[in-house]
Amino acid sequence: MSDRGALSKKLRNAVDGVLCQSLVKRPHTLPSGRYVSICFDDFPKSAAVNGAPMIEARDWRATWYVSGGLCGTEHGRFGEMFTQADLRRLIRNGHDIGCHTFNHIDCSDASRAEIIGERERNAAFLSSFGVLDVQSFAYPYGAANLDCKRAMDTEAMALRGGKPGLNRGVTDFNMLKATGLQTDRGGILRALEDLESLSNSDGWLILYTHDVQDDASGGGITPDDLDQVLQAIEASGADVVTVGDMVQRLTGGKHPTLQWAA
Ligand SMILES: [Zn+2]
């Protein structure tokens, strides 16, 4: 992309970000209490092999935003991606499986038909693993505009963006905030600040990352850093819930299951 093209996309994203914060909202009042969710996006094999056992050792579970098209591939940034066996193990161990776009397309650059098609293709992929009731979707790159917010707007799923910070009080379930654990976004400092802030008042902190390895990419973190974050979560006393758990709590277990296309 040329400098001019990159600048105009940056400007467009900024405008879309402002519009998405105020329109096509689906407000829900969060339950009282302090909550943390941990998410892995895309997802790299190292997250399943190194990250999942660290979470399970605390008897917690995470939410995994799967892009079916990345299964069994080698990623230029994150390295080896998840395999079918990795996904099966996470499901067996009780983790929450969320939806990303099948080919990890940027929704802010896609038509409504493309977004729906990607979601349905990903849902068909997940259903082949027995995952029929997907309760949340994460916008790849945290990127959205009003069209894709409208395209994804359904009572059946919570939608997660990429704006850092705590979700508090009345929260837009079409654009949940989430703080990245990424070496290219200040590493874990923002997450530790958010956890500190959560220790003083109610809210829901959603954390996300990608690879978990010693030589982490800019989008991931090292096992040592993840351990530090998990220790801080434990010290905060917040309840660790999956994103799916929170959707269930808000709907009193009457979560309207999205009927995926076969
Ligand atoms: Zn992603």
Image (cartoon, helix red, strand yellow):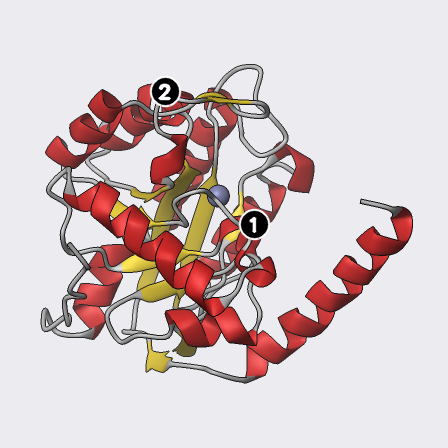
Q: Mark 2 points at which residue?
A: 50
> How far apart are the two marked residues, 2 and 1, measured between alpha carbons?
23 Å
Is residue 2 something that shows in the picture?
Answer: yes
Q: Name the residue under label 1.
A: 141
Expressed as whole percent of the image width and height from the top left, the position of residue 151 reads 42, 72
Q: Which residue is drawn at 58% across and 62% down?
A: 108
The residue tagged with tag 1: helix, strand or loop? helix
The mark total stands at 2
Q: Which residue is drawn at 36% across and 20% down?
A: 50
Res 130 → quadrant: top left
- Sort mark 1 into few (<14), some (14-19) or many (20+) by Cα contacts within 10 Å: some
The residue tagged with tag 2: helix, strand or loop? helix
Expressed as whole percent of the image width and height from the top left, the position of residue 48 reads 32, 25
Q: In which quarter of the image is the C terminus?
A: bottom left
Is residue 40 toward the left or the right of residue 180 in the image?
left
Expressed as whole percent of the image width and height from the top left, the position of residue 84 reads 24, 25
Mark 2 / mark 1, whichever is N-terminal: 2
Q: In which quarter of the image is the N terminus?
A: top right
